[in-house]
Amino acid sequence: MSMAPEEWLDRNNEYLGAALALLRQRLTDLVPPPEAKAAKTSGYGEWPARAFFRGRALKARAIPLLAPPERREAATNEERLARAAEGEPPPALLILERQLGLSGFEREILLMCVAAELDTGIGAAFAAAQGNSQRTYPTFALAMALFDDAVWEALSPERPLRRYGLIEISQPGATPFTVSALRADERIVNFVKGLNYLDERIASLVAPVATLDPDDLPESHRQALAGLAAQVGADGEARLLLRGADGDGKRQIASALAGMLGLRLVVLPAESIPSAGELGTIARLWSRERRLLPLALLIDAHDLDGPLPPDHPAQRLGLFARECNGLIMVSARDEVAGLEPDAARDVAKPTAREQRTAWTAALGDARVDPGLAARLASQFDLSQSDIAAVSREALAADDEAPLDARLWRGCLTRARPPLARLAERIDAKAVWDDLVLPPTEKALLHQIADQIGARATVYDDWGFRDQMNRGLGISAMFAGESGTGKTMAAEVLANALSLDLYRIDLSAVVSKYIGETETNLRKVFDAAEAGGAILFFDEADALFGKRTEVKDSHDRYANIEINYLLQRMESFCGLAILATNMKSVIDKAFLRRLRFIIDFPYPGAEDRLRIWERALAPRVPREAIDFAALSEFDLSGGSIHGVAINAAFAAATAGTPVTMALLLDAVRTEFRKSGRTVNEAAFVRIRAVSGTGGTP
């Protein structure tokens, strides 16, 4: 039965005190009598006599007879030492011996070095025992003379004392190795005294992770945990790779596995892997620390993506994982170069059903719409920790907004993708009434919104998710001439669904370097996979064009990009919208995979009238405007909005309301901008009909 911490600390101090007393007694025994000091000898000297033959130490030590009180004191200290060593856990020095594989002689060397740090008066005893008043420190020669079972290999770089950095050797200049000062590492001195903490050289690189109960994991993650646990050897040694897009889930699985094995988990970011010169030292320190605390290590390379420069720390990930021992886990999205794991597991986000259960548990007794958990789980693909955090923040918020709205807003914030370089977030303001389209096309847009809202029912309640691996997302193409409302329709959907809208920047995504375009596209889709964003590929024909006959390497790699897009579009679980004014150049394989194709027709006169009536903002001052007359001009919806804005600026500059004349001038400018012929007769007629009179 394990003893209480306070009891162990008392026993450890008792053991250490007895060990130091015995060490002092040994040092006293080694001091030569006065007559021996006066003797003149050659070679190694008579006191103590030490000879080395064929690598084997032959000891001949004369010990003066102890006086009875001294005998009784030595016996008493040996009894104290034996009593204090009983029980579990043993004293710290014996833990070091057991955990790091020290021999008895190596343990005594370490004790001698620790004594130099703890006993301020022992320096004189070291000097007297070595017959040199300057050597007030322990040396290997002194240890060879002082302790039984001495072996020369004890201070080999491969033996524990030096391999794990338990002691340091100070060897200035031409000082012989055997008489150089030995010093115990500060961390080890504190450990022997009963203070156990992580070495600061390791602590500065890692962060601790709270232990997680396996029962708190979703079922799919518990299955991955069981598979990984089966690969850990009886000695706790294993190198495991956790692949997949769920960074939080991988960390939770690693924490639960460490807890099952009685270990504490620490995380090392891949960017903090030490340099090549320090890598071996840090790996050996880790091998020491993981035995003393004990620890498991998770190397986090989850956020690394794409090709890395040659000098990036993560390039040394595989080497570092091989150098370290114990339970080493690596979190990455894909395979890691140079790493040969004992086992690998793919870790995805919790399933939609598991997320629904997590939402229900996190909300507890809160009064919400019974179907809210299903809607949140179907729209947002969040980790279990994110669900708990969003629920906690929404329940604690001092906000007048309904709880449903706070939860949805929290999910949007949590799932907002890091796409600053590859996409532009559009602040969607357009609503259904702003959209002027024929009834058929508008009905298709409503159908898209309805399918997004009904995914929980169809996929989960009705079981379609169990039958489908791909096609769980919704992809649509908006085809039509420029200015016919494709972007506005995307904004309307984002606004209606309360989702973020991201317009993909093709200039940042497409790269001339082989493989980088696919990497950028994967970042875009993965970032939006959490469900909080609609991807809008404007001018999609530049990216989704037809595959060509392979005539050279450029054609081959261009086709590879398109093939990757085909696969990624099909596996994407969110809403992706492709907008193009050249539908005929889109590869047919994309068209087959699109659930909706909506043609945006050029507006006729009636549609143009409705667009003109909505073109000016409500607070714009205006005179009587003949919108019916303006609708006779053959302009797209985008051009009409441009005309309205230009006229408003002209009115603001002149300090007048927006007039028919200003609008006609802006129409003329729009025609000239697009290179179209200006029919002055039509302008004269419309001026006459609208009462603005004359020609410009």
Image (tube, helix red, strand yellow):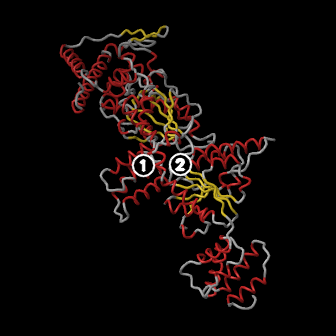
Answer with the quarter of the image where residue 614 lies.
bottom right
Q: Residue 300 at x, y = what percent?
A: 49, 40
* Relative image position of residue 559 (x, y in whole percent): 72, 43
Numbered-mark total: 2
Q: Residues within 10 Å of mark 2 (few under 14, many from 20)?
A: many
Q: Is residue 609 above or below residue 203?
A: below
Amino acid tagged 1:
Asp
- The image quadrant that residue 260 belongs to is top left
- Viewer-proximal residue, 182 or 617? 617
In the rendered view, tell whether residue 84 sits above or below residue 61.
Answer: below
* Residue picked out by circle 1: 386
Query: Residue at the location (69% across, 49% down)?
Result: 511
Instruction: Identify residue type, mark 2.
Output: Glu
Q: Spatial distance from mark 1 to mark 2, Cα to Cα? A: 14 Å
Q: Is residue 265 above or below residue 626?
A: above
- Please name whichever residue, 160 or 538, is drawn nearer the observer in this view of the structure: 538
Picture coordinates of residue 286, whole percent (x, y): 45, 32
In percent of width and height, residue 168 lies at 44, 29
- Does 78 sit left or right of 582 as displayed? left
* Disc 1 crowd, CA 10 A, few/some/many (<14, 14-19, 20+): some
Q: Which of the two discs, 1 and 2, sits closer to the camera? A: 2
Q: Quadrant of the N terminus?
A: top left
Give the residue pinned by disc 2. Answer: 529
Of residue 184 and residue 290, the one placed in the foreground of this image is 290
Q: Nearer the viewer, residue 315 or 139?
A: 315
